[in-house]
């Protein structure tokens, strides 16, 4: 049975209020606001094969199309690519500075707003996304960047090319114990030289859920993210009663910045229609989430 749906106004009255945290060092000032047309791209796997096996989820593409079909409604974001299945492998998502066979600069990191749909898993202190085919080093996962990764490990490090906004429709993509490494996915290892970094990442603490009945959630996010991105993600992707186990779906939004004021300003106000200049560092990371949110496969959210 699909969960009962409410209007946005009704759901705001029913939902707990998300809170924010910040951690890091104090360094610099808030950059000026800027404006530019944004490219939107979507990558999703619904049909896995024996090369990198996983359970098929037909509704995933339709669900993410809720975002892709409406992300251009205000004329700020234009659709620049939608890939479903095909030769989906880690090279699309990993950075060439981490492995020579990676090519995110021509694929995933060539978007300004990126939405991905992958089976996700807890890799200890970071997230990994299951691919359809093997990629660099013969692996079947796109590995989120993490501290202490051996040299030559193909890692997801977005932002040095284009990505400002990185949306993960993927289980355990932003578990609370991963957040310091989530930050590493938001800037490339050479960001110190070119100053380019992602601004906001969105994902889930614990398991997220896939259903054609959730298409509207992603559509609502696409529309409201033009005005308040972190709020839109946590508002529209939260669910207080999923499946037969009475668990919650726990969305998380994260920003980075050189100091607390900058980080919180991004988290609370940045949007497709209000894109700030690139963060000058990632010394601070801030998160918006539902305190104590209790999903499947993870303990209640308590960073």
Image: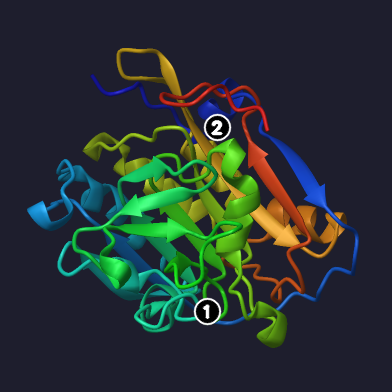
Q: Viewer-proximal residue, 26 or 255? A: 26
Residue 191, how many percent across, how many down? 65, 79
Please, which residue is most extreme toward the top here?
A: 245
Q: Viewer-proximal residue, 214 or 296? A: 296
- Determine the residue positioned at 40% across, 83% down: 100
Scheme of image coloration: rainbow
Q: Which mark is residue 111?
A: none
In the rendered structure, the answer to whether residue 235 lies left or right of residue 169 reads: right
* Picture layout, residue 52 above or below residue 175: below
Residue 8, how many percent across, how many down? 50, 35
Q: Secondary structure at mark 2?
A: helix
- Determine the residue positioned at 55% across, 62% down: 185
In the rendered structure, the answer to whether residue 293 lies left or right of residue 287 reads: left
Q: Quadrant of residue 207?
A: top left
According to the picture, the residue beneath numbered tag 2 turns out to be 9
**Distance from label 2 to label 1 (Cα)?**
34 Å
Residue 250, how many percent across, how many down? 50, 32
Q: Residues within 10 Å of mark 1 (few under 14, many from 20)?
A: many
- Determine the residue positioned at 25% across, 66% down: 138
- Determine the residue positioned at 15% across, 45% down: 58
Q: Residues within 10 Å of mark 2 (few under 14, many from 20)?
A: few
Q: Earlier in the sequence, mark 2 or mark 1?
A: 2
According to the picture, the residue beneath numbered tag 1 turns out to be 162
Please, which residue is most extreme toward the front here?
A: 150
């Amino acid at each position: 049975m699909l969960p009962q749906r409410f209007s946005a106004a009704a759901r705001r009255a029913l939902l707990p209020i998300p809170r924010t945290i910040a951690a890091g060092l104090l360094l610099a000032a808030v950059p000026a606001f800027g404006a530019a047309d944004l490219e939107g791209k979507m990558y999703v796997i619904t049909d896995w094969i024996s090369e990198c096996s996983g359970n098929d989820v037909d509704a995933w593409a339709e669900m993410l199309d809720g975002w892709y079909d409406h992300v251009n409604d205000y004329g700020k974001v234009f659709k620049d690519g939608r890939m479903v299945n095909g030769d989906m492998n880690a090279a699309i998502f990993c950075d060439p500075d981490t492995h020579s066979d990676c090519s995110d600069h021509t694929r995933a990191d060539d978007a300004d707003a990126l939405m991905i749909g992958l089976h996700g898993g807890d890799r200890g202190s970071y997230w990994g996304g299951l691919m359809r085919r093997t990629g660099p080093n013969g692996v079947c996962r796109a590995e989120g960047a993490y501290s202490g990764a051996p040299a030559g490990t193909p890692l997801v490090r977005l932002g040095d090319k284009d990505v400002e906004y990185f949306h993960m429709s993927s289980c355990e993509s932003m578990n609370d114990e991963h957040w310091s490494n989530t930050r590493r996915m938001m800037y490339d290892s050479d960001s110190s030289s070119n100053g380019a970094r992602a601004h906001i990442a969105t994902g889930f603490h614990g398991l997220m859920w896939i259903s054609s009945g959730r298409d509207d959630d992603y559509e609502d996010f696409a529309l409201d993210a033009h005005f308040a991105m972190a709020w839109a993600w946590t508002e529209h992707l939260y669910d207080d009663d999923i499946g037969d186990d009475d668990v919650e779906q726990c969305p998380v939004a994260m920003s980075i910045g050189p100091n607390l004021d900058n980080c919180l300003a991004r988290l609370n106000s940045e949007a497709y229609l209000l894109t700030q200049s690139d963060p000058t560092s990632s010394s601070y990371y801030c998160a918006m989430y539902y305190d104590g949110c209790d999903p499947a496969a993870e303990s209640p959210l308590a960073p």
